[in-house]
Amino acid sequence: MTATATRVLVLNSGSSSVKYQLIDMNDGTRLAVGLVERIGEQTSRLAHTPLAAGGDKRETEGAIADHDAALKAVAAELAADGLGLDSPQLAAIGHRVVHGGLKFTEPTVIDDAVLKEIERLVPVAPLHNPANITGIRTAQAMRPDLPQVAVFDTAFHATMPEYAARYAIDVETADAHRIRRYGFHGTSHAYVSRKTAALLGKDPSEVNVIVLHLGNGASASAVAGGRCVDTSMGLTPLEGLVMGTRSGDIDPAVTFHLKRVAGMSTDEIDALLNKKSGLIGLCGDNDMREIRRRIDEGDERARLAFDIYIHRLKKYIGAYSAVLGRVDAVAFTAGVGENAAPVREAAVAGLEEMGMAVDASLNAVRSDEPRLISPEYARVAVAVVPTDEELEIAQQTYALVNA
Ligand code: ADP
């Protein structure tokens, strides 16, 4: 790395997509952002926006066979703006890696041993880690000389005490198969809890925050003095809150029942709980905008789906209030948390005795900035804090390669 290398490329490789951002770490400026979707299909789509050049979004459609081809297409787009991967200004590539198991609790420079360990974790993250590995391999092949850093979704949750992380099942069985609560969305929970402290004018070590990351996937965490002490996702991202397509918490005996009585296979049950449950299973839609629109039209199924979603959210706010003892702030983030005022209002409604309330006019404000939506008298600050996982990954990556 040269002294002028101040840029980090962040890659977030999903099962059929790659999201990327090229960020200048001098001031966090986005030089380019983009997304490749539907990798492996005939209708793959690449959308690239060269922000540095002030350019418009460029979209190309057409088959992109695999992640290797996707990254090459991304590299070509970047090169067209003079931001190619061969640039001496590029300091590192930061990869989002979903599952870091017990071993990876910090951002880690990737070498063969690290890659092997990420591979070893595929059984606990079958949907995510394989795509992350492909992304890393392709990026390594393109710039073998450049530091590649893995930033793990699980890392922030590594501080959970054993009594929060361990399931109440036979210890030998659990340990033999590495079964425990790992938690996910950690990069977002870390970023948002820190930003919330800043919004209150405090150091993270001084505040207790409940973070509600409500995207298509959703998770809650209890953060005490900057350290995660509990989180709602578990061994996999299936546990916890009601999500776009995942059930969240459910009696595990439901799965035996589906197998024994409904005759479903393990893979079918997996697909049912991960892809056909949650909001989409309950009402046929997983987009909160559409659900709100249907509710406004008097749709009962959409109403019930919304109420189930909110009920679960409330239970976690209550549980984490008890876990933390004192709550300074509740922070809403991600697609639903940042945009859906009715979700924020309903989740906090009736919690006045717990010091929580939402001011209707503050809640109605639309903004990209962190902001308070609680009335002045409320003991607990309720906040909307836009998450920025890419910036967090870039910052952790840059800090590591400059250490
Ligand atoms: P993920 O990263 O998990 O795919 P996001 O954090 O981008 O998800 O959140 C996507 C979800 O956010 C959508 O499915 C939709 O339910 C919700 N969402 C996005 N914009 C709005 C909006 N303006 N109003 C309500 N919900 C929204």
Image (tube, rainbow, N blue to C red):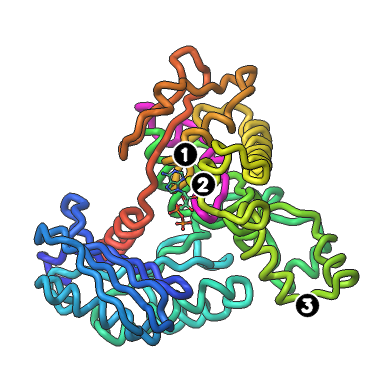
User: What amino acid type should be assigned to the residue bearing mark 3?
Assistant: Ser
What percent of the width, then of the height, locates residue 290? 51, 48
Q: Are marks 1 and 2 in contact (CB under 8 Å)?
A: yes
- Residue 288 is marked as 2
- Residue 265 is marked as 3
Task: Find the magenta span and give its range.
Answer: 199-223
Disc on the earlier residue, 3 or 2:
3
What percent of the width, then of the height, locates residue 107? 41, 63
What percent of the width, then of the height, locates residue 136? 38, 78
Q: Residues within 10 Å of mark 1 (few under 14, many from 20)?
A: many
For the residues marked 1 and 2, what is the alpha-carbon distance in whole angstroms? 7 Å
Closer to the camera, 4 or 265? 265
In screen coordinates, is 300 left or right of 146?
Answer: right
Image quarter hosting the C terminus: bottom left
Q: Is 202 contained in the magenta span?
A: yes
User: What amino acid type should be assigned to the residue bearing mark 2?
Assistant: Met
Q: Is residue 316 visible?
A: no
User: What amino acid type should be assigned to the residue bearing mark 1?
Assistant: Ala
Q: Which residue is outermost to the right?
A: 261
Q: Residues within 10 Å of mark 2 (few under 14, many from 20)?
A: many
Q: Residues within 10 Å of mark 3 (few under 14, many from 20)?
A: few
Image quarter hosting the N terminus: bottom left
For the residues marked 3 and 1, what is the alpha-carbon distance in whole angstroms? 36 Å
Disc on the earlier residue, 3 or 1:
3
Closer to the camera, 194 or 112? 194
Is the CB–ligand 1 distance for label 1 below 8 Å?
Answer: yes
The local secondary structure at tag 1 comes to loop
Q: Is residue 235 above or below residue 242?
A: below
Q: Is residue 363 visible?
A: yes
What percent of the width, then of the height, locates residue 210? 54, 37
